[in-house]
Amino acid sequence: MLHIYFDEEHTNMVSEGTGTNPDSVRISGAAGGSDERKLYLWNDDGNKTYEDVSITAANDDENVNIQYALDINGSPGEWAESINLPNGDYRTAVPFWRKVIVASHEESTTRRDIAHKFTAVEFEK
């Protein structure tokens, strides 16, 4: 099954609903700002392959916008609200980037609940 990881070695998985290891940012709301992070999608089942893979934010709002970019030689490509990743078995971790943009507002913002939604069509090899 596909999962999102903080590391290429797929040892540090982003928590999926439990909140035990969330993707999080801490940005001053008074100033606003952004945070970029490279993440990885990896498949833990060697008998599966995936097509039509896309990633989008599950919980951005009026103060926090989450965007994504394909990895281009270790740097983010063009930022968008969602991205499509290549078809494949994902047995080698596939990098992508996420950017959290916090608008200027009155309070500091610590988001510990950044949620990414990915969809894919799964096939047996």
Image (cartoon, rainbow, N blue to C red):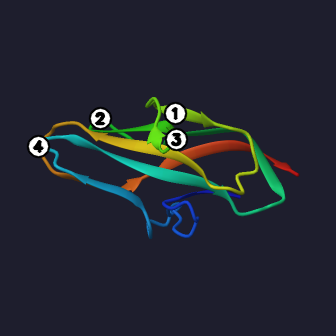
**Which residue is labeled 3 in the image?**
73
107 relative to 8 in the view: left or right: left
What is the secondary structure assignment of the residue under circle 4? loop
**Which residue is labeled 4 in the image?**
30
Amino acid type at image mark 3? Asn
Disc 1/disc 4 C-alpha distance (Å): 27 Å
**Mark toward the viewer: 3 or 2:** 3
What is the secondary structure assignment of the residue under circle 1? strand
Amino acid type at image mark 2? Glu
- Identified at 44% across, 70% down, the residue is 20
Expressed as whole percent of the image width and height from the top left, the position of residue 9 reads 58, 65
**Mark toward the viewer: 1 or 2:** 1
- Crowding at mark 2 (Cα within 10 Å: few <14, some 14-19, many 20+): few
- Crowding at mark 1 (Cα within 10 Å: few <14, some 14-19, many 20+): some
Expressed as whole percent of the image width and height from the top left, the position of residue 23 reads 41, 57
Amino acid type at image mark 1? Ser
Is residue 81 in view?
Answer: yes
- Which label belongs to residue 114? none
- Which label belongs to residue 82? 1
Disc 1/disc 2 C-alpha distance (Å): 17 Å
First of labels 3, 1 by sequence position: 3
